[in-house]
Image (cartoon, rainbow, N blue to C red):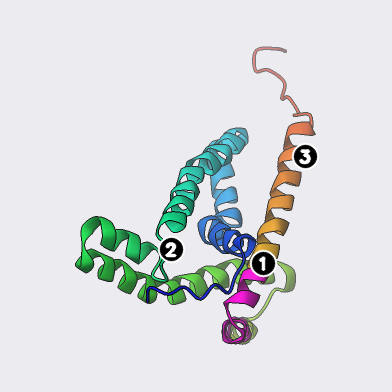
Amino acid sequence: MTQLNKQITRSQGIGLLATTLFGTGVFILPQLTVDIAGHDAIYSWAGLTLAMLPIVWVFAKLTSVHSHAAGPAYFVEQAFGALAGRVVGLLFVLVMPIGASAAMMMVVMEFMQLMFELSSRHSFYAQLTLLFSIWLLNIRGVKLSATIQLLLTLAITAVVIAMIGMFTLTPSVSSPSAGAH
């Protein structure tokens, strides 16, 4: 597994990494953050973005130095030994198909419920259709999936930037002070 079969471009790889790091955080966590932090949520999001940058840079550097098909499992193996590398690889194999699908289902089904008020039976059929679509996409190969995820990342980034712009440009409504009568 030391030979790389370079099927995706750097941009597609960035899209895959970005959707993995952002994941459901862009869709589910904002409301939770606003509930807790209120107007200061924007600072939480900026902090989260800044906190992710070192992770992205470390992965980029590791990948440029150690191009290996096993990816993070290989990095762990080099740092901590073969057993640790195998454990990380196994965890990735066991968690990603289930975790990614579950996250996708949560996000998509949350939006579908808001748009269509699905019954439990229709929700079940929509979930099966979504899983089958994801499976078909994966059968087509990583290149198509990476391209779609890159486009999705660009779209999400544009929406988030637009929301930040609207948030910062919209004047806040001040409430009357409690002491004034």
What kind of element bears circle 3? helix
Which of the numbered marks, if any, corresponds to residue 67?
2
Location of residue 110 by image quarter: bottom right
Q: Label 1 sits on what residue type?
A: Phe
Q: Name which residue lies at 57% across and 76% down.
A: 142
Range shown magenta = 127-147
Position of residue 133 measured from the top left corner of the image (x, y, whole percent): 63, 84
Alpha carbons under labels 2 and 1: distance apart: 38 Å
Position of residue 10 measured from the top left corner of the image (x, y, whole percent): 60, 61
Location of residue 171 by image quarter: top right
Q: Nearer the viewer, residue 145 or 167?
A: 145
Which of the numbered marks, if any, corresponds to residue 157?
none
Q: Are marks 3 and 1 in contact (CB under 8 Å)?
A: no
Q: Label 3 sits on what residue type?
A: Met
Relative to 168, is 19 on the left or the right?
A: left
Alpha carbons under labels 3 and 1: distance apart: 22 Å
Q: Which residue is mark 3?
A: 166
- The answer to which of marks 2 and 3 sits earlier in the sequence is 2
What kind of element bears circle 1? helix
The local crowd at label 1, few if under 14, some if 14 to 19, many if 20 or more residues have their Cα within 10 Å, is few
Magenta-drawn stretch, dominant element (helix, strand or loop): helix
Location of residue 63 by image quarter: bottom left
Position of residue 32 measured from the top left corner of the image (x, y, whole percent): 54, 49
Q: Are marks 2 and 1 in contact (CB under 8 Å)?
A: no
Q: Which residue is mark 1?
A: 111
